């Protein structure tokens, strides 16, 4: 499902214009992104939890040359499904 399809379904269900539904969804996504950038945990009851996790630095290998490459620690987004999604 694409963002456009979500906008269309929400606009139709709530009787909103597609422009207004798109604005609301865009703002929601911006807020989620900004919260994750700040390192905050986002919990949506019965849906799931989004949070960031810092990975350890590690040594990787270039498969073409076999050369070792040092990868720094980085932040990664994780998702833990809630009760509703676990039932699916």
Image (spheres, grey):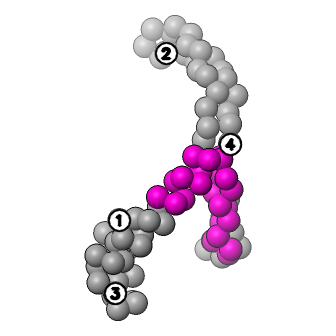
Query: Relative to residue 41, is residue 73 depicted above or below?
Result: above
Residue that badge 3 annotates: 16
Picture residue at 66% right of the left edge, 21% below the top: 58
In the picture, measured across the screen, residue 71 lies left or right of residue 7, that is right
Q: Determine contact: label 4, label 3, CB under 8 Å.
A: no
Q: CA distance from mark 4 to mark 1?
A: 26 Å
Q: Determine contact: label 4, label 1, CB under 8 Å.
A: no
| Sooner in the amino-acid sequence: mark 4 or mark 3 | 3
Query: Is label 1 in a helix, a strand or a loop?
Result: loop
Tell me if I can see residue 27 in this picture: yes
Residue that badge 4 annotates: 53
Q: Which residues are magenta?
A: 30-52
Residue that badge 2 annotates: 62
Residue that badge 1 annotates: 2
Residues 65 and 46: in front is 46
| Sooner in the amino-acid sequence: mark 4 or mark 2 | 4
Q: Residue 8's quadrant in the figure? A: bottom left
Sort mark 2 into few (<14), some (14-19) or many (20+) by Cα contacts within 10 Å: few
State which mark lies toward you, 4 or 2: 4
Name the mark on residue 60.
none
Query: Relative to residue 52, is residue 24 depicted above or below?
Result: below
The x, y position of residue 37, in whole percent, is 57, 46
Query: Is label 4 in a helix, a strand or a loop?
Result: strand
State which mark lies toward you, 3 or 2: 3
| Sooner in the amino-acid sequence: mark 4 or mark 1 | 1
Picture residue at 55% right of the left edge, 13% below the top: 69
Q: CA distance from mark 2 to mark 1?
A: 34 Å
Q: Quadrant of the N terminus?
A: bottom left
């Amino acid at each position: 499902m694409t963002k456009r399809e979500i906008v269309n379904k929400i606009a139709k269900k709530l009787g909103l214009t597609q422009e207004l539904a798109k604005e609301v969804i865009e703002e929601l996504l911006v807020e989620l992104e900004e919260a994750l950038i700040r390192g905050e945990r986002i919990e949506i009851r019965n849906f799931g939890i989004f949070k960031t996790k810092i990975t350890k630095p590690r040594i990787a290998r270039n498969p073409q040359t076999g050369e070792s490459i040092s990868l720094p620690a980085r932040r990664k987004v994780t998702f833990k499904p809630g009760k509703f999604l676990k039932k699916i």
